[in-house]
């Protein structure tokens, strides 16, 4: 596997460099211990020889890791791995990593292993604490000290008391490995690191061990790790074949598992967050692999997240710069910080620390996606010297997993040592950040966020509050009604010298702004004078990313405002009096629900709460109908789409409604409005074998809501005889990567290469889990599958698509009269945008108001046409026609000399989201004119340009403004429902889930309330 000639070549060339390095490596501040082995430290010679053998160049190591300390009692990683950490061909399962950590615990009083929870597939997650026996014995006492620093209210914000605690406390540095499953190096690096920290008697290591607690979760994505090891084993068994790409990591999402630190929907996020908060750790350092050779993105690039304390951003600079400096002195090339990662989004796992008064850090090291030693050639931009990468990586190297492990361990050891050297400063900062968080109301504000008791979507309100509780945010409830003053809005100074009279007139017409707001008793109050106020503030506040920001490539989403995306009211209150309101802390948050009143017929209001779908499937045998018009009963108003339930057992309904937090009202008689049945639709959920990254969030949402579905791949569709016999609705959620319409049809290349199986075999026992399997991942939907989909819709089925699958549906021809354009200059990078209700009578819109915030990521731009086969162009709205040059004024008609004037027929007009009206000319032999009943029906459209931005970045929004956002296209007897927004995303967009759920529940009545064009 290794090309020895080229190895030797590199080694000779680097000999001179090595001499220089050894001298420089010993340099350190005079009062700091040198980062080196103690000459008296016994060395495990055999293990050390292998370390050297597997390290491909002398400068890919450091004096800290180029040997292994020997121990008579403590087993080395070789005991479990059969070779050294980072050895070629060796990739341990999580189970093996845990086995080793538990052997360490058994052999050394310096190691303790804690179980921190399980994954979606039931695998264990652990945290390993390494410190002196003394520190480990006093864990609880120490935790009590850290808890006081973490919550300065407990010491009455007394700085002198804090200083005493700072002097006594032992800090906790939390390291997490391999959240991204194809990034494989961390587990072995962390096994060896744990060994070094527990046995090495060199002063440099001893200081770390005695001075602090190193906490390690060696495998974060445990389900994905085991799949990755399977794939690697398959690759070793079939060395000449291409190996299957890791299509599933955890049960639900792949790479996005590192974007869940806002919504906390995945077990791995919850387990790491709980561990971080429980241990009151100062640092959360997450290990990744992609960029050569070690990108410490601690410093990162702008824009920085607006809600973090500047004390933290200073810490980033200190730690990041020092880490690079230490490794540069070892002569290790390609170590840098700054880079192009902006720290705007708080969705990354490591950001749990940034949002909970700690220090967030992340390494990208270099990896081969497995344990093969391979020659790697870099892109010019990867090895270019820049001002922030003065010592860049080399253009071409032989790279091994051992090299990766050397970099990771060297980076971590120098970080731990530097942190320990400065721990009093960092502990004091930990306290100060918490204190400044508690001081938020009177410092930068706000004083609180209030979620009013008269919320029309209590179950969604409860969901949002439960997210905050997962984030360790304290929630209170007002015991009585209260009033707060609203901030006075400052008038913007007028820029131009507009006519003063006009301005005065305008002011006279303006209604006075309210100066206060009342909240009823029972309103939820999220006080900002609490230690973890900043995560609540970051989630509930609005985001603004300037189109002029120097950062042109946002690393991730730019907006996420949870109140907007959950569709619930959240009031940002700056009036400090809100903190004096009589309130009590609440621990259990559950929306009230059950049956009220007397009668045999029950009504449940539809306010677009996803819980309605849960209830429908719970009451599988009940007779449920939807009202097609609003109605009133017993003095209560019910929206369109409200449930009317007959023949239900009251006790069952009461229990089910209470469970999901919905209020059913018993009414004397069914209201006299038109209704249609709401059936428990049979749902197929389609995925590709190209990528499951984005659909995973949809699966998670449906599972959460207990909406059942069959999970099938595009390959399976052609094999199902009669789709309509099995399913009412087919969901085809976004694909994510590699999602072009032709890729969905064709799949991966099959003209060459070998089959890529995704199934359980002796070499791959963990691959399938609870997802799906195939003998060959390569084939796509195929034209047979496409024909099946088309037939399904023609015969009355409902197909729902979003973003890239909507593009697929429009481009491949599943719909007529809708085109999807790609933006030219528009930049809507994961933002919250405004949409507007166009057709409230459509069941898809049941429960929604006029304005609905939604998540958009440069969604396809839909334009409608009533002419089949018309060239799909983006509608530009009504052109402003000015009259031609002639007689008279601009408003007067021209004339023609010698004949009476003729009135031109009025030009038909239409809105941007509508299809242009069919003209008389088009109707002449108009076989292409789509009959009114077959035309697309726009349910929601994007807001006007000025109202488009709610949170995040919107640049060039005019391209998508007013264009359709959700369209229902009749096709044969069925429907294709197209979304330009992504309604189900990262557990953050629960306010738009009901657009999908309404489609499912009303699948056979989607035409309800439809008004057809006259011609
Ligand atoms: Zn990664």
Image (spheres, grey):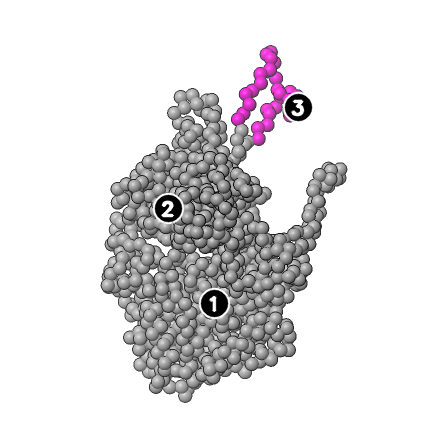
In space, the residues marked 3 and 1 are separated at their CA atoms by 74 Å
Residue that mark 2 sits on: 621
**Residue 935, percent across and down?**
43, 32
Q: Which mark is residue 889?
A: 3
Asked if residue 897 lies in the magenta stretch, the reply is yes
**Disc 1 or 2, which lies upstream in sequence?**
1
Vertical side of 732 occupied by 576: above or below: below
**Which residue is drawn at the image coordinates 68% and 60% (left, top)?**
577
SS for dot 2: loop
Of 252 and 991, nearer the camera is 991
Residue 291 found in image quarter:
bottom left
Highlighted range, magenta: 880-908
Residue that mark 1 sits on: 274
**Residue 787, percent across and down?**
30, 39
In space, the residues marked 1 and 2 are separated at their CA atoms by 40 Å
Answer yes or no: is residue 553 visible.
no
């Amino acid at each position: 596997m290794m090309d020895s000639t080229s190895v030797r070549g590199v080694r000779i060339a680097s000999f001179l460099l090595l001499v220089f390095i050894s001298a420089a490596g010993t340099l350190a501040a005079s009062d700091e211990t040198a980062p080196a082995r103690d000459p008296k430290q016994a060395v495990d010679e055999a293990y050390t020889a292998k370390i050297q053998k597997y390290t491909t160049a002398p400068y890919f190591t450091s004096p800290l890791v180029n040997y292994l300390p020997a121990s008579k009692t403590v087993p080395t990683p070789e005991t479990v791995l059969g070779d050294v950490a980072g050895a070629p061909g060796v990739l341990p399962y999580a189970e093996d990593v845990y086995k080793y950590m538990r052997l360490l615990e058994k052999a050394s009083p310096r190691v303790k292993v804690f179980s921190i929870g399980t994954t979606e597939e039931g695998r264990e997650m652990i945290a390993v604490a390494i410190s002196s026996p003394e520190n480990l014995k006093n864990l609880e006492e120490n935790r009590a000290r850290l808890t006081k620093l973490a919550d300065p209210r407990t010491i009455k914000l007394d700085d002198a008391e804090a200083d005493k605690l700072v002097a006594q406390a032992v800090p906790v540095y939390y390291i997490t490995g391999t959240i991204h499953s194809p990034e494989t190096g961390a587990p072995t690096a962390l096994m060896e690191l744990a060994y070094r920290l527990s046995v090495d008697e060199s002063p440099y290591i001893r200081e770390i061990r005695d001075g602090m607690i190193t906490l390690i979760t060696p495998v974060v994505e445990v389900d994905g790790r085991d799949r990755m090891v399977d794939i690697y084993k398959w690759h070793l068994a079939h060395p000449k074949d291409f190996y299957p790409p890791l299509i599933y990591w955890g049960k639900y999402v792949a790479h996005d598992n590192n974007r869940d630190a806002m919504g906390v929907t995945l077990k791995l996020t919850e387990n790491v967050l709980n561990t971080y908060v429980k241990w009151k750790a100062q640092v959360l350092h997450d290990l990744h692999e992609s960029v050569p050779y070690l990108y410490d993105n601690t410093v990162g690039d702008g824009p920085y997240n607006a809600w973090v304390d500047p004390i933290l951003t200073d810490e980033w600079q200190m730690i990041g710069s020092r880490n690079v400096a230490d490794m540069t002195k070892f002569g290790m090339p390609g170590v840098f910080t700054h880079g192009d990662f902006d720290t705007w989004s708080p969705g990354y796992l490591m950001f749990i620390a940034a949002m909970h008064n700690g220090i967030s850090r992340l390494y990208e090291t270099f990896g081969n996606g497995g344990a093969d030693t391979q020659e790697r050639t870099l892109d010019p931009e990867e090895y270019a010297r820049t001002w922030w990468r003065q010592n860049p990586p080399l253009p071409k190297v032989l790279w091994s997993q051992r090299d990766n492990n050397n970099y990771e361990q060297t980076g971590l050891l120098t970080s731990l040592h530097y942190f320990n050297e400065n721990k009093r400063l960092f502990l004091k900062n930990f306290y100060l950040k918490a204190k400044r968080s508690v001081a938020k109301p009177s410092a930068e504000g706000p004083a609180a966020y209030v979620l009013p008791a008269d919320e029309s979507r209590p179950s969604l309100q409860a969901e949002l509050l439960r997210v905050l509780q997962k984030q360790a945010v304290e929630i209170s409830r007002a015991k009585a009604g209260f009033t707060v003053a609203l901030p006075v809005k400052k008038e913007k100074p007028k820029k131009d010298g507009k006519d003063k009279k006009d301005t005065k007139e305008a002011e006279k017409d303006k209604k006075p702004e309210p100066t206060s707001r009342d909240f009823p008793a029972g309103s939820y109050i999220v006080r900002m004078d609490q230690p973890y106020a900043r995560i609540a503030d970051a989630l509930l506040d609005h985001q603004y990313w300037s189109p002029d920001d120097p950062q042109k490539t946002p690393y991730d989403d730019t907006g996420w405002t949870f109140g907007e995306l959950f569709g619930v009211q959240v009031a940002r209150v700056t009036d400090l009096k809100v903190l004096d309101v009589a309130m009590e802390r609440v621990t259990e948050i559950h929306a009230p629900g059950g049956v009220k009143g007397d009668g045999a017929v029950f009504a449940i209001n539809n306010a677009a709460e996803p819980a309605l779908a849960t209830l429908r499937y719970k009451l599988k045998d009940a007779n449920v109908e939807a009202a097609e018009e609003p109605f009133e009963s017993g003095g209560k108003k019910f929206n369109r789409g409200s449930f009317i339930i007959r023949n239900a057992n009251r006790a069952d309904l009461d229990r089910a409604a209470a469970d999901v937090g919905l209020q059913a009202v018993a009414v004397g008689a069914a209201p006299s409005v038109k209704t249609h049945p709401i059936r428990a639709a049979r749902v197929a959920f389609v995925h590709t074998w190209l990528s499951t990254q984005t659909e995973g969030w949809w699966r998670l949402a449906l599972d959460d809501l207990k909406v059942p579905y069959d999970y099938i791949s595009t390959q399976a569709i052609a094999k199902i005889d009669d789709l309509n016999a099995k399913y009412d609705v087919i969901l085809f959620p976004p694909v994510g990567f590699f999602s072009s319409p032709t890729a969905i049809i064709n799949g991966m290349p099959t003209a060459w290469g070998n089959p890529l199986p995704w199934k359980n075999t002796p070499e791959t026992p963990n691959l399938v889990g609870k997802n799906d399997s195939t003998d060959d991942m390569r084939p796509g939907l195929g034209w047979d599958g496409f024909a099946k989909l088309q037939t399904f819709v023609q015969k009355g089925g409902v197909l729902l698509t979003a973003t890239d699958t909507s593009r697929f549906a429009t481009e491949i021809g599943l719909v007529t009269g809708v085109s999807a354009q790609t933006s030219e200059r528009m930049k809507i990078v994961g933002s919250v945008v405004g949409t507007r209700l166009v057709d409230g009578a459509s069941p898809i819109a049941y429960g929604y108001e006029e304005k609905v915030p939604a998540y958009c990521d440069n969604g396809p731009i839909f334009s409608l046409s009533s002419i089949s086969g018309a060239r799909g162009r983006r509608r530009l709205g009504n052109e402003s026609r000015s009259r031609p040059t002639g007689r008279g004024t601009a408003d007067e008609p021209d004339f023609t000399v010698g004949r009476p004037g003729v009135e031109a027929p009025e030009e038909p007009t239409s809105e941007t989201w509508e299809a242009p009206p069919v003209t008389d000319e088009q109707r002449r032999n108009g076989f292409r004119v789509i009959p009114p009943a077959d035309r697309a029906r726009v349910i929601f459209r994007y807001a006007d340009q000025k109202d488009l931005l709610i949170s995040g970045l919107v640049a060039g929004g005019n391209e998508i403004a007013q264009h359709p956002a959700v369209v229902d296209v009749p096709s044969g007897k069925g429907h294709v429902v197209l979304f330009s927004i992504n309604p189900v995303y990262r557990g953050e967009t629960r306010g738009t889930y009901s657009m999908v759920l309404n489609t499912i529940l009303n699948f056979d009545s989607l035409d309800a309330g439809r008004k057809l064009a006259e011609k």
